Structure formats: structure tokens, C-alpha cells
Amino acid sequence: MNNILSTLGLCMRSGNLSSGDFAVSEAVRKRKAFLVIVALDASGNTKKKFRNLCSHYKVPLYFWCEKEKLGHAVGKDFRASIAVTDQGFSDAVRKQLDKESFMEV
């Protein structure tokens, strides 16, 4: 888990991550997102929104972690959703998520 959070923090510092509902939605719509992560404790409405959006634009979606940990990793209070906007970082995070046996949705 710490490896994933560290990678997401590095991704944020390098400018290859969008966070927050609106920014993530825009990244997906503009086809800049290579991976979307939604917090496990996000609202049902948020989960449904991103499930539909990512399905339509064919962006990998994972439900993982809590909002507080996700936000802390990217230097914010809490975040319910983040989008990785770099292919290399996306591949690294997906590999780590798959290794921890979190299922793609």
C-alpha cells in the first residue's frame, strides 16, 4: 500500500495527476487520464459516476484506499478521486495494485 501511495505522491509532484471530482472528470473526457482511482469510502453517486464515465471512455478504474489516505498521498486533506495522466506512472500503479490483488472494476 505504501508503495502505491508513494508512487501517487511522486506522480502529483511531477504534474501527472489530477485530483478532485471535476478535474478527474475533465481528464477522462479529454482523454488525458490513463488510470482513475476512486476511494472505497466515496459516495455511491461518485462511484456510479466514475464507473459510467470510465466505462464509456475505456479508462481503467480501481476502487481502492480511503479518501483521507488518498488525499494525504497527493498533499491534500482528502480526495475521493484521482486520475493518473501519464502512461508510465499509470502502468507502475496498476502493476502495484494488481500485485496487491485489488480488482479492476
Image (tube, rainbow, N blue to C red):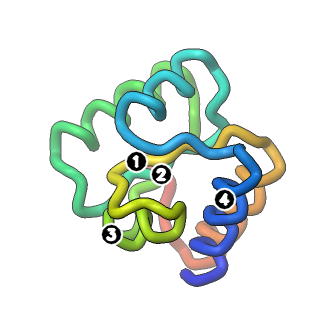
Percent of width and height locating residue 5 = 57, 72
- Mark nearer the N terminus (4 vs 2): 2
Residue at image point 76% right, 61% down: 92
Callout in the foreground (2, 3): 3
- Please name the residue that numbered disc 2 is placed on: 37
- Please name the residue that numbered disc 4 is placed on: 94
Q: Amino acid at mark 1?
A: Ser
- Secondary structure of residue under mark 1: strand
- Mark nearer the N terminus (1 vs 2): 2
Percent of width and height locating residue 74 = 53, 61
Distance Cα–Cα, label 4 vs label 1: 15 Å
On-image quarter of the N terminus? bottom right
Comparing 70 with 101, the one in front is: 70
* Label at residue 50: none
- Please name the residue that numbered disc 3 is placed on: 68
Q: Could you tell whether 79 is left or right of 1 in the image? A: left
- Please name the residue that numbered disc 1 is placed on: 81
